Image (cartoon, grey):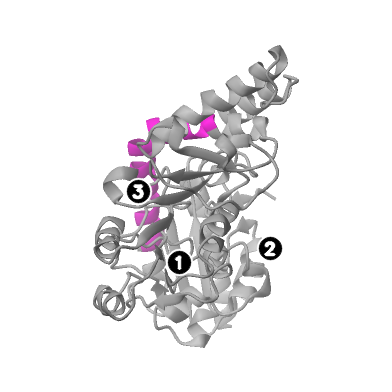
């Protein structure tokens, strides 16, 4: 059976150039913290990768701190504010919600956008030390107005953290113009290897320390650098930056074909966040009276890999907290499938997904 992969928001296929860069680094012996010949060679791989990652979000390389991924980055920032007043959006990724159980949750509209009127009222009632809002939602693809959110938060003296995992490589990011203070990235969301991420910070800030016991990464993140994964991260960032316009054009065309075809299959199909700004590679589809678990297994049997939500928690098949926050009832929140594509996706992938989905609908109706 031919397999079709449409779960790019969980992880993307690693780009050949990223694999080549990682393999080259793996062939080199050396600890990037050592000052001898071999250590300096390893250090070069790290610094050569830092530059394209910085360029992807328009910062200086010195503002990039490598880590193991965005979950670590989100935990680093949110845990650093555990004894302070924190606001997070109600639709954040679990890696931002879990380390801040004390946080005040900012509600969202039915379209998945931050409710700015409520946010302004909350800012008047409280003075947060930190506001954390993701740039792009991993389940719906909805894009937040980070610049406006940052400006409001800063008017109350708050620091701003942004999980930009699903935004990097999909929308243009200017870290300085956005007004945020901390930003988290993950390599495997745009063609890099799993296990490498970055924390971007505003010049002059002291970053909360999460990993202790070493002087790596300018004494901001202890632990021997994963040189091979970082090298692959840099290669993927370089390509994501270079090819963003063509990526967006291709993914937009795929989404248009996919969603238009779905609408022809029946009026009981709902596209979550359809009228909100969304990244072009994501469609979250609700099929009423059919659980996500049933749908996912049916699609998998037809050779199509998709997701029921955030890959970090989808195995439990719980109602999506994102959709509940958007005002969906619990039944609908259990009936959504996420389709996501990217750099290696083709028209044939969309055709395969549509054929499998239509076959599933007919079977369920019987």
- Disc 3: which residue: 253
Task: For the residues labelled 1 and 3, say whether their Cβ atoms are less than 8 Å apart.
Answer: no
- Disc 2: which residue: 301
Highlighted magenta segment, given as a residue range:
234-259
| Numbered mark located on residue 284 in the image | 1
Residue 354 can be seen in this image:
no
Give the percent coordinates (x, y) of residue 197.
56, 44
Looking at the rendering, in which quadrant would you find the C terminus? bottom right
Task: Check the image and name the residue furthest to the top.
Answer: 37
Task: For the residues labelled 2 and 3, say whether their Cβ atoms are less than 8 Å apart.
Answer: no
Q: Residue at x 59, y 76 (%)?
A: 363
Kindly report the secondary structure that dominates the magenta region of the rendered protein: helix
Q: Residue at x 35, y 49 (%)?
A: 252
Q: Is residue 244 above or below residue 139?
A: above
Q: CA distance from mark 1 to mark 3?
A: 16 Å
Between 113 and 33, the one lying in front of the other is 33
Crowding near the residue tagged with mark 1, few <14, some 14–19, many ≥20 C-alpha atoms within 10 Å: many
Q: Is residue 348 above or below residue 134?
A: above
Picture quadrant where residue 308 is located? bottom right
- Left or right relative to 267: residue 361: right
Picture quadrant where residue 122 is located? bottom left
Q: CA distance from mark 1 to mark 2?
A: 20 Å
The earlier-in-sequence mark between 1 and 2 is 1
Give the percent coordinates (x, y) of residue 56.
40, 36
Q: CA distance from mark 2 to mark 3?
A: 27 Å
User: Element type at marker 2?
Assistant: helix
- Left or right relative to 89: residue 151: left
């Amino acid at each position: 059976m031919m397999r079709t992969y449409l779960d790019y928001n969980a992880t993307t296929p690693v780009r050949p150039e990223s694999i080549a860069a990682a393999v080259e680094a793996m062939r080199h012996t050396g600890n990037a913290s050592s000052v001898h010949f071999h250590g300096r060679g390893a250090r070069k791989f790290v610094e050569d990768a830092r530059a394209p990652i910085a360029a992807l979000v328009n910062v200086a390389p010195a503002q990039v701190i490598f880590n193991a991924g965005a979950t670590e980055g989100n935990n680093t920032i949110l845990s650093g504010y555990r004894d302070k007043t924190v606001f997070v959006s109600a639709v954040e990724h679990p890696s931002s919600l879990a380390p801040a159980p004390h946080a005040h949750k900012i509600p969202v509209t039915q379209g998945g956008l931050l409710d700015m009127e409520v946010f302004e009222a909350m800012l008047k009632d409280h003075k947060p030390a930190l506001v954390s809002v993701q740039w792009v939602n991993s389940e719906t693809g909805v894009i937040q107005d980070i610049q406006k959110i940052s400006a409001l938060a800063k008017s109350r003296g708050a620091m701003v953290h942004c999980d930009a995992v699903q935004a990097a490589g999909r929308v243009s990011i200017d870290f300085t113009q956005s007004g945020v203070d901390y930003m988290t990235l993950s390599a495997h969301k745009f063609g890099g290897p799993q296990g490498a991420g970055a924390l971007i910070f505003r010049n002059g800030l002291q970053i909360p320390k999460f990993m202790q016991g070493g002087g790596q990464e300018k004494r901001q993140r202890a632990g021997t650098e994963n040189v091979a994964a970082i090298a692959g991260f840099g290669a993927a960032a370089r390509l994501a930056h270079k090819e963003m316009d063509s990526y967006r054009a291709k993914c937009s065309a795929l989404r248009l074909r996919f969603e238009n075809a779905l609408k022809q299959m029946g009026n009981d199909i709902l596209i979550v966040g359809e009228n909100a700004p969304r990244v072009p590679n994501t469609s979250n589809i609700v099929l009423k009276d059919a659980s996500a678990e049933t749908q996912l297994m049916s699609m998998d049997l037809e050779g199509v890999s998709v997701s029921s939500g955030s890959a970090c928690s989808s195995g439990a098949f719980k109602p999506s907290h994102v959709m509940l926050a958007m005002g969906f009832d619990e039944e609908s929140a259990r009936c959504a499938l996420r389709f996501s594509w990217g750099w290696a996706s083709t028209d044939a992938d969309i055709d395969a997904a549509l054929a499998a989905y239509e076959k599933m609908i007919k079977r369920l109706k019987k």
